[in-house]
Amino acid sequence: MSDLLCLIKAARKPVIGMVQLTALPGSCRFGGGRIDGVLEPALQEAEVLAAHGIDGLMVQNLGDLPVDTRATFAQVAWMTRVASELRRQFKLPVGLNLLENDAEAMFAVASAAAADFVRIKVFIGAMMTPFGIETAQAHAAIRARKAADAEGVAIFADVHDRTGTPIASGGFAEDLDFAVRLGGADGLVLTGKSTQQTLEYLAIAREALGAVPILVGGGATAANFAELASLADGVIVSSSLKDTASAFGRFDRAKVKAFMDAAGRARAPARADAGTDVAAR
């Protein structure tokens, strides 16, 4: 079982911090240079998160926007190096989100870098995104995981990711079921266009799927963590911790501390309850 799934099972409500890379070779924004120009900033960002008790890291090639539907060999190689170094230096669960939704490339990186999980934004159905129509990657992901002998790498699948619009969907509840029952996702990532919509998504998912692991994919803040964590098993966070208040920026130590302090307060009762349950057995 992946380390992230173990944290969820232990009711830790893990916080996963995004390590968003500058442009990689093959992207239209790459300005040249050696890999150290990407690796060093990534390690610095991860250090800020780790110093304040983050539970896991997720690597994303955000600097490659606008992206193609398939990663280049160079992008795969550089992301593998970065993910490997993060895993080696910080001893935390490391996940991957390789834009734009290239499941095969993600498992190539995950298997080589000993990554713990992947996030796939279009797992079932189809979505109209800013970069065109993206189609289901469930088959490609399951096949690639098996081919790479990476069964321990968990698949977290977005359903109705907020950056796109579902095409010919049978509805949110049906797509939740398809992602888990037909697609084989180990967990889900849910993100509405507002905190209220995210909470609505979470409530529907809990009613429909029970204990299936669910992460909030965006929009988490120090102010709303407790409310989100009352329904979700953990959160993925980036923008609210940056000095720019957007994904494009650097982590602000004060914001990271405030967020993790809020998370600690919200998680304390759940951990106490979990400890009581264990002691009673």
Image: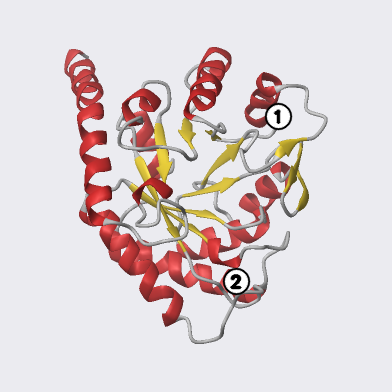
Query: Is residue 53 visible to us here?
Result: no
180 horizontally vs 135: left or right: left
Write the residue at 66% across / 45% down: 142
Left/right placement of residue 99 relative to residue 8 reads: right
Taking the spot 29% from the left edge, 48% from the top edge, the residue there is 54
Name which quarter of the figure residue 170 lies in.
top right
Above or below, 254 against 138 in this view is below
**Residue occupying image coordinates x 37% and y 64%:** 86
Total numbered labels placed on residues in the image = 2
Do the residues under discs 1 and 2 have CB atoms within 8 angstroms?
no
Task: Examine the rendered structure and indicate whether residue 277 appears above or below residue 242.
Answer: above
Instruction: Give the colour scheme shown.
Output: secondary structure
Residue 3 lies, in percent from the top left, at 38, 44
Q: For the residues marked 1 and 2, what is the alpha-carbon distance in whole angstroms?
A: 30 Å
Task: From the viewer's side, name the closer residue of 159 and 258.
Answer: 258
Q: Nearer the viewer, mark 1 or mark 2?
A: 2
- Crowding at dot 1, Cα within 10 Å, few <14 / some 14-19 / many 20+, comes out as few
Q: Nearer the viewer, residue 166 or 275?
A: 166
Q: SS for tag 1?
A: helix
Q: Residues within 10 Å of mark 2 (few under 14, many from 20)?
A: many
Assign the N terminus to one quadrant of the image. Answer: top left
Q: Say which residue label 1 marks.
A: 182
User: In x, y percent, where is residue 35?
Assistant: 47, 81
Q: Which of marks 2 and 1 precedes in the sequence?
A: 2
In the rendered structure, which amino acid carries the disc numbered 1?
Answer: Leu
Residue receiving disc 2: 75
**Horizontal and vertical percent position of residue 96:** 51, 55
Tell which residue pokes out farthest to the right in this image.
168
Viewed as shown, does residue 246 lie left or right of 273?
right
Residue 26, percent from left and from top: 66, 76
Badge 2 element: helix
